[in-house]
Structures are given as structure tokens and as C-alpha cells.
Amino acid sequence: MTEIGRVYVKTAGRDAGKFCTIVDTLDNNFVMVDGQVRRKKCNLAHLEPLEKTVEVKKGASHADVVKAFEKIGLAIITTKPKTKKGNKPVHQRKKKEKQTKAPEKPTKAAEKKVEKKPAAKEAKK
């Protein structure tokens, strides 16, 4: 009863309760499904067959499956794939500003002290 185009209901996993159809048979236990579920490999034990069938060829694209589901009255919501926005911003550390001391202006009192010291040394000699 596993034929391409048969409509199934997923009974397990993230897409449980949603309708799908077999697009390709991989081996005795696994098939490729598409429809209201994500297009992926699925175990036959996780599918419940319905009486409905859709007209799709082996290896049909997602667009073909969407058109076939619309003919039998099942809607498929399509989503846009995620797009990369670019590189993540990198946090830049703030650089410390070099603090340079401005040359001190000598005050009048400092000038007098500077002058007195050499004068005092000369007097001692």
C-alpha cells in the first residue's frame, strides 16, 4: 500500500498530525515525504495511510506537491528560508587615551626657591 502519491498522516515526531504524500521510496522501511511536513526521509511505521491520493511523479518537486494538494483541498503553508544577515558585530574595546601631563608653569614662589638654592650653595663655598 506504499505507493507514490498516497496521502498519509504523520503519527510521530515534530510534524505529527499533518498531511503528507510519498514522493520517493528509499527502501522497505523508509520513504521520502513532502506536503504539510518538512521534505525528509520518514519511517513507514510513523505514517497512517488515507484513502486520498494525489497525482505526483516519483521525485516530484515541492511546487508540484503543493499544486496537487491544492487540487484535493489541502492547504500547504510555505515559509521563506532563513537568510543570513551578514557577520555578527564584534564588540570593540574602547582604547585608553594616553594622558600626558602638560609641563607645569613655574610659579613665582617656585622660581624664588630655585634661585635661592644655587645662591646658597655658592655662599657656602
Image (tube, helix red, strand yellow):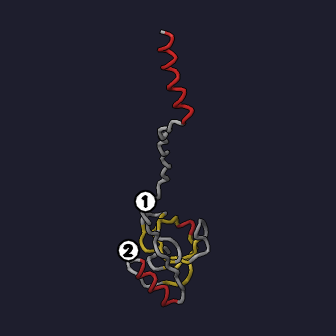
**Residue 14, percent from left and from top:** 59, 67
**Residue at the disc numbered 1:** 87
Q: Amino acid at mark 2?
A: Gly
**Residue plotted at (49% across, 76% down):** 79
Q: How many marks?
A: 2
As drawn, 20 above or below 105: below
**Residue 67, percent from left and from top:** 44, 86
Q: Look at the numbered disc 2 and give the secondary structure of its residue.
A: loop
**Residue 95, percent from left and from top:** 48, 47
Choose between 26 and 107: the one closer to the eye. 107
**Residue plotted at (52% across, 64% down):** 43
**Residue 117, percent from left and from top:** 52, 21
Classify 10 Å Cα crowding around label 2: few (below 14), some (14-19), many (20 and above). Answer: some
The residues tagged by marks 1 and 2 sit, at their Cα atoms, a distance apart of 36 Å
Choose between 106 and 86: the one closer to the eye. 106
**Residue at the disc numbered 2:** 59
